[in-house]
Amino acid sequence: MRDDSMQAARFGAFDPVLAAILANRLDAIVREMSNTLLRAARSAVINSGRDFSCAICTADNRLLATAEGLPVHIFGSHLQTKAMCELHPDLAEGDCFLHNDVYLGNTHLADHMFLAPVFVDGEHLFTACTKAHQADIGNSIPTTYHPGARDVYEEGSLVFPCVRVQRDYRTIEDIVRMCRARIRVPEQWHGDFLAGIGSVRIGERRLRELAAKHGVATLKSFVEAWFDYSEARMVQAIRKLPKARLVNTGRHDPLPPILPDGIPLKVEIAIDPEAAAIELDLRDNIDCVDCGLNESEACTINNVLTGVFNCLDPDVPHNAGSFRRLKLRLRENAVVGIPRFPHSCSVATTNVGDRLVNATQAAFAQLGEGWGLAEGGSSMGVGYAVVSGRDRRQGGRLFINQLVVSSNGGPAGPVADGWVTYGLPVVAGAMYRDSIELDEIKHPILFREFRLLPGSGGAGRWRGAPAAHYVYGPLHDPMTVVILGDGMVNPPKGVLGGEDGARAVFYRLASDGTRTALGNGTRLELRPGEWVGGSDNGGGGYGNPLSRPPERVLHDVNERWETANRASAVYGVVLRRASDGAYALDLAATERARRAAEPR
């Protein structure tokens, strides 16, 4: 920890106007890197779903700028730049590295991180970082997620422990040949590979331009002042919190037959406003499990920090400065901690990671009204499945891609309802949802149904967002569908009297209409005329539903977020049908109904 007066002096000595300009310029560089990848990538999971993130780290491995990156991707970027520096003491201008090793700081093997050290006048000043989820990484099954993998060997992915892929700006073709020989969609992967390198090179170019304009000495002074300012903002945010020790739990659904009871989680949080510090203790969790649901160290850090930042002033910068006030206690060989080789972390960025975000942010609701959040939808279900097969429209060429069409109801908070296009707790709306029409153009897939489910969000003074329902299947030829799952047994929890969100549902629909329930970790082969369907989670509610303004309940019913039956049974709001078919509020009857429903 640093002395507050030292922080003030460091930042006060730097021109605040120039500091604002440089901070926003760095964010703009990260956004340009992101736009480069978005427009140049080949796979739909990147150029439609936007499952990627960019960041800038300092040469001494501190996270500096993140812009609109996914927290699950970029909060731990400094762990990977640290590995780059330690493994490659001969860093030079024109280098670029590919890194996806979870035991050296990466999130999971499906996330390929490109790292380019940025040199100015021979000095390493920054590292440009671009991480993108891949459609295929050579897994033993056609999906980048392998929940059933007993270890990294069964997972089967190509592993790049911070491997140099460019020297003096020239690509090392041996690495490209390795991937082409193993990855199911080599041309698609190679396009994404080139896009990732292009993204970090854009970052490198813009950072050099920034140094040329303002000078290296000015940039170095700014970096230290910006970190001190960020820490000072974090100090202010923490000092607004009550002193408390919070304990919260969560549970991932069962994964038969490997985990018949699922995975229990426990988060312990100590808030010390006087010291302006938050300690997060995850040591009291079970050991690593023999499947792909273990959290990598990076994901453990990223996801618990996401839960904390969700409950603080959103204007606090997310960088190494604000991180100084957060202390994490992790245990080696824990399912949320520091994994022990060769346990698989194939699914580290979602599933247990989503539960970790939820458990952390919901813990803050124990502080009382106005604090924390409910739990958000965490179903990695039908809307996030990985689909693969052959496309006769392209001469029988193999295709594989992860769909990103799921909505998952967002959690209610102390001042707002849940976000409809939430996605997952680990991304919280920062990813894009696929265009269904574009998915149908890119792949031989047909969507039959996509709709929101009224009444599926957790009721509360602020309600969780509703779940969505999907049905799709192959267009012409058989198609493989791999579903991770979660949220069917343990739905997102409400807080402070708010109700839970809806449970997820997955099923197979035969050509004769027969419906067969599916479980978590399902791989199925669909023939033409067969369909896979399901619903994701609704978000948890916040506060007593009987305290929700009746006018809001009326609006929800007329907009079909809620049902008239739940308006009466859960919210105590009496509605009448108007002549135009819409509902109208009977305020006097509502007041009587709510008085009768109050506990005596």
Image (spheres, grey):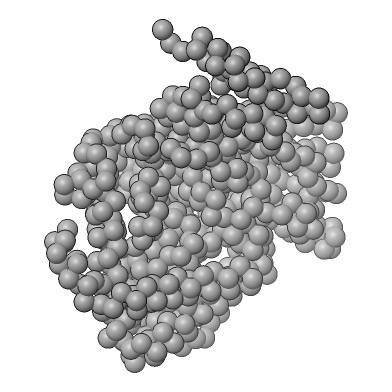
**Farthest top residue in view:** 600
Give the side of residue 227 with respect to residue 403, left or right: left
Of residues 182 and 32, the one drawn nearer to the viewer in this rendering? 32
**Residue 586 in sight:** yes
Of residues 250 and 367, the one drawn nearer to the viewer in this rendering? 367
**Farthest front residue in view:** 588
Residue lying at 14% horizontally and 64% vertically, measured from the top left: 5
**Residue 248 in sight:** no
Residue lying at 52% horizontally and 86% vertically, measured from the top left: 170
Which part of the image, by quadrant, shows the N terminus? bottom left
Residue lying at 48% horizontally and 67% vertically, measured from the top left: 54
Residue lying at 26% horizontally and 46% vertically, measured from the top left: 240
User: Residue 387, position in %: x, y?
Assistant: 69, 49
User: Residue 52, position in %: x, y?
Assistant: 53, 61
Which part of the image, by quadrant, shows the C terminus? top left
Of residues 191 and 471, the one drawn nearer to the viewer in this rendering? 471
Q: How many marks?
A: 0
Q: Is residue 227 above or below residue 483?
A: below
The answer to which quarter of the image holds residue 99 is bottom left
User: Residue 42, position in %: x, y?
Assistant: 66, 67
Q: Is residue 181 above or below residue 491?
A: below
The answer to which quarter of the image holds residue 518 is top right
User: Residue 4, position in %: x, y?
Assistant: 16, 61
